[in-house]
Image (cartoon, helix red, strand yellow):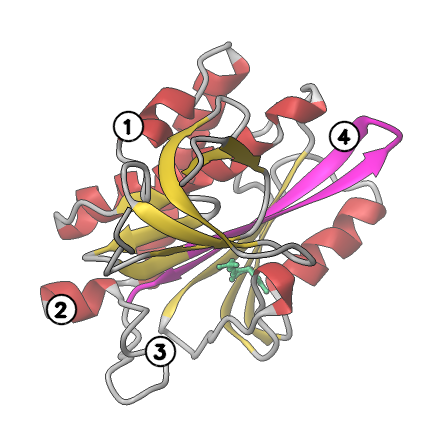
Amino acid sequence: MPPLGQPLIRFDSIPSTQEWARGWAELGAAEGLTIHARSQTQGHGRQQRIWWSPPGGGLYLSLLLRPAIPLAQASHITMLAALAAIDTCTALAAVQPRPKWPNDVLLNGRKLAGILSEQSLQGDHLRYVIVGIGLNVNTDFRHTDLADIATSLRSVSGRSYDIERLRHSFLDALNHRYQQWQSGISPYHAWRRQLEPVGRMVSVQRPGQPELIGKAIDATPEGALQVRDAHGHTHTIWSGDVVVQKHPPHP
Ligand code: BTN
């Protein structure tokens, strides 16, 4: 099995690394194929939200995976990518980001990285997964609409980083964690240990459903968030957006 990151195809600018990786996956490319772009013109995240991808601003990467796993474990791929991003930032920038449910990495409460894991299924069989990561490295968000919610390694440490070096480090970390996972070691415990927003009051927005307010009490090994509402009912949330309540209502 070739390591993740091989072959590596690099672009100066493309619409989205995610679509390129999917195109190759559909043509039968093997696990490990990685598409890296210096900038993206249509970078996107979950629910087609724009992922700002200026040249040299961040690591914009998509990998093709073909793991032989039950569908219930597919969320582990997002956990692995989040942990590898954290490993990289800790090693290169001496910072300690945290994973945030469902697919983010936070630093000082702001979004440092986002992970987009897209599956192709045949029945309940996983054909492949494209895992994309956008990691904010040198981007300056100060005078943008994202100033309050996004951050970058440079914003926190005051210095710039070489994106190629960061990619090496990320792929090394991901290979290491992916091999461990393939040998039966779940990423869940490492991901869950520091998981935001466990322990906090949150509001959860789910497409087509009413807002849920409650306390995030845990996450399951399959990656669902558990939220206990004011009536003591525990809700298991598989997808949605979570906002931490700064001023929780009185009980
Ligand atoms: C999210 O926060 O919802 C996930 C963001 C994922 C962005 C990355 S950048 C590389 C790859 N290409 C894309 O268009 N999206 C992912």
**Kind of element beneath mark 3:** loop
Above or below for 9 versus 97? below
What is the quadrant of the N terminus in the image? top right
- Which of pointers 3 and 4 lies earlier in the amino acid sequence? 4
Q: Which residue was labeled with disc 2?
A: 159
- Which of pointers 3 and 1 lies earlier in the amino acid sequence? 3
- Which of pointers 3 and 2 lies earlier in the amino acid sequence? 3
The residue under the point 26% across, 79% down is: 140
Q: Residue furthest right?
A: 123
Q: Which residue was labeled with disc 1?
A: 193
Measured in 3D between alpha carbons, the distance from the residue under mark 3 to the one under mark 1, in whole angstroms, is 28 Å
The residue under the point 42% across, 24% down is: 187
In x, y percent, where is residue 27? 85, 47
**Kind of element beneath mark 2:** loop
Residue 245: tell me if it is visible: yes
- Which of pointers 1 and 4 lies earlier in the amino acid sequence? 4
Measured in 3D between alpha carbons, the distance from the residue under mark 1 to the one under mark 2, in whole angstroms, is 29 Å
Measured in 3D between alpha carbons, the distance from the residue under mark 2 to the one under mark 4, in whole angstroms, is 41 Å
| Residue 17, label in figure | none
